[in-house]
């Protein structure tokens, strides 16, 4: 028998004003293939959420031109997770209170360009983590057949049993993804598109296809749709230490979970 | 004005059975929508799903698993729920059944959403999917099965003659009345869950019958993707042939006069055979 308990506070702020506020709590007890769940309250978990969300309010009030969603989740294992999704002019990042200001400023700094959509792609800001989240992480969740990744690339994407709420069936999901390079080749291509922020992505286990929607780049928004093998073969180089990407809220089977994502600056060739 | 919901759902989800009991409330205060689990009152009794409904759910699961080869089922969720709703002096009870199943025969994926435990539809689509051939151009005339036309209707609001079907209450406890569906703001509010802020929506829409259905036209029996605008990627049956195709659903040539069936698309949509 296993027991899962959770509380969460979920708030939506528009231009510095609170517009929606939700409290959720509950317990799920699993015996074999059966789960018995109810909205039973654990006061300690609710208090943990209240403490953290109060601390996050200070940051939100200053984001006067943004749509901000704060979600604090406290679970029975002692974990308290806070995520802030900040959107300005339709482009968003997912961050934490400690990085919120820097990522809010990033949203104002990055701009779509009008370069031709051709050449190599240089994945800045750790955005390659999203590409690998779909092509490596989700494929692992679905036990997909291996593909040949470059020998200079190592990817840490452990799977564990996770669920969004007490109402959900737990699934094997990524906790985080960290891509690292060791002695990777890196020559900045003359003809290139530089990706700053990604809007979303998907992996289809039936077709083994990866889709990534780029939100901000030197060539404007665009979409990549390639097989996992093509993605792996396109990895042409990387440089430096893993950079924290301000994302990712990962949705699978309708359950949205935060996945911390890090990758070095990476180059792919042949995807455009 | 506080909305209160007491509910219980029994759900089968990809091999796991889950029972969920909740009492929730929601209200707006100074422009802020707030939702939270309700403090249980001593007189408040939680609701139960009748034993007969549980038996129906188990039977649906068993029959579906028996009638579709296991490797062909990508996702299978079936649920039986009961809920009492209370707001502004109105109180009502709803029972709900839902099935979502995705069936695969690479590279095709058929999506089925139902508000009944209709295993016959699932079996029909599964059998056809197993025989599916290659992609074909859209036929000049094509019929849409009720489960397909119901998915299309919300995209045709204001473009096709349809009405909101009266009966029951909306998310703010107001009666749902029969009305012509237009581009104008809908009179009713849709609240899919207690923690979701209600939005204006046309509820339980149905297309008004017209024209004549050509029963020899190929029949679209399932969606192969969620609908994008009015573009439908569908699994089509023409005699002994089964094939995937993509059609534009914006020009409806006929709507059957048969009794429509309710499907869980948008804020409720009645499906009936239609012809493009």
Image (spheres, coloured by chain):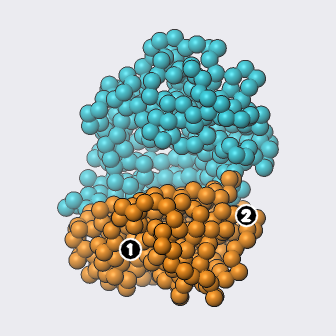
Chain colours: A orange, B cyan
Asked which secondary structure carries label 1, the reply is: strand
Residue B195 occupies quadrant: bottom left
Asked which secondary structure carries label 2, the reply is: loop
Provide residue B57's location: percent of width, then percent of height.
Answer: 66, 44
Provide residue A260's location: percent of width, then percent of height.
Answer: 51, 78
Identified at 64% across, 38% down, the residue is: B117
Provide residue B244's location: percent of width, then percent of height.
Answer: 65, 34
Look at the image and tell me in which quarter the C terminus of chain A lies: bottom right
In this figure, what is the number of numbered marks? 2
Identified at 62% across, 14% down, the residue is: B215
Judged left or right of residue B246, residue A230 is: right
The residue identified by callout 1 is A84
Q: Mark 2 to mark 1: distance in Å?
A: 32 Å
Q: Residues within 10 Å of mark 1 (few under 14, many from 20)?
A: many
Q: In this view of the protein, can residue A91 be seen by the observer?
A: no
Q: Nearer the viewer, mark 2 or mark 1?
A: 2
Q: Residues within 10 Å of mark 2 (few under 14, many from 20)?
A: some
The residue identified by callout 2 is A144
Judged left or right of residue B151, residue A226 is: right
């Amino acid at each position: 028998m296993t027991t899962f308990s959770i509380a969460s506070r979920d708030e939506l702020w528009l231009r510095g004003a609170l517009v929606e506020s939700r409290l959720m709590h509950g317990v799920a007890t699993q015996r074999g293939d059966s789960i018995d769940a109810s909205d039973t309250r654990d006061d300690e978990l609710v208090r943990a959420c209240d403490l953290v969300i109060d601390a996050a309010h200070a940051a939100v009030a200053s984001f006067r031109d943004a749509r901000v969603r704060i979600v604090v989740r406290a679970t029975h294992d002692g974990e308290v997770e806070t995520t802030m999704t900040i959107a300005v002019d339709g482009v968003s990042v997912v961050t934490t209170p400690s990085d919120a200001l820097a990522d809010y400023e990033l949203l104002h700094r990055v701009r779509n360009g009008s370069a031709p959509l051709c050449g190599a792609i240089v994945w800045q800001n750790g955005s390659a983590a999203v590409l690998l989240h779909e092509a490596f992480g989700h494929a692992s969740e679905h036990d997909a057949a291996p593909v040949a990744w470059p020998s200079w690339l190592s990817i840490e994407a452990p799977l564990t049993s996770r669920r969004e709420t007490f109402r959900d069936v737990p699934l094997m999901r990524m906790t985080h993804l960290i891509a690292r390079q060791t002695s990777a080749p890196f020559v900045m291509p003359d003809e290139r598109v530089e990706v700053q922020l990604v809007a979303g992505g998907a992996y289809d286990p039936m077709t083994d296809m990866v889709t990534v929607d780029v939100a901000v780049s030197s060539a404007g928004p665009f979409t990549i749709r390639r097989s996992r093998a093509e993605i792996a073969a396109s990895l042409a180089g990387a440089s430096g230490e893993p950079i924290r990407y301000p994302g990712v809220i990962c949705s699978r089977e309708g359950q949205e979970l935060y996945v911390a994502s890090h990758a070095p600056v990476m180059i792919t060739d042949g995807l455009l | 004005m506080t909305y209160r919901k007491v509910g219980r759902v029994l759900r089968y989800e990809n091999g796991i059975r889950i029972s969920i009991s909740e009492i929730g409330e929601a209200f707006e205060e100074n422009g802020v929508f707030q939702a939270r689990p309700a403090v249980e009152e001593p007189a408040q009794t939680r609701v139960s799903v009748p034993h007969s409904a549980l038996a129906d759910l188990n039977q649906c699961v068993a029959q579906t698993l028996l009638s579709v080869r296991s490797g062909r089922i990508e996702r299978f969720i079936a649920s039986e729920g009961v809920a009492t709703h209370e707001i502004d002096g109105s109180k009502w009870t709803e029972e709900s059944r839902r099935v979502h199943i995705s069936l695969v025969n690479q590279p095709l994926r058929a999506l089925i959403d139902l508000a009944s435990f209709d295993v016959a539809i699932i079996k029909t689509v599964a059998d056809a999917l197993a025989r599916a051939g290659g992609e074909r151009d859209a036929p000049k005339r094509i019929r849409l099965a009720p489960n397909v036309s119901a998915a299309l209707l919300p995209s045709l609001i204001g473009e096709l003659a349809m009405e909101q079907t009266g009966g029951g209450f909306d998310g703010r406890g107001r009666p749902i009345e029969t009305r012509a569906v237009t581009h104008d703001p809908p009179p009713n509010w849709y609240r899919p869950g207690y923690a979701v802020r209600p939005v204006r929506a046309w509820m339980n829409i149905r297309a008004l019958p017209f024209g004549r259905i050509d029963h020899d036209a190929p029949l679209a029996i399932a969606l192969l993707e969620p609908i994008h605008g009015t573009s439908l990627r569908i699994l089509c049956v023409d005699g002994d042939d089964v094939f995937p195709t993509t059609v534009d659903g914006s020009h409806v040539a006929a709507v059957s006069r048969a009794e429509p069936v309710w499907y869980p698309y948008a804020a409720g949509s009645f499906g009936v055979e239609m012809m493009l």
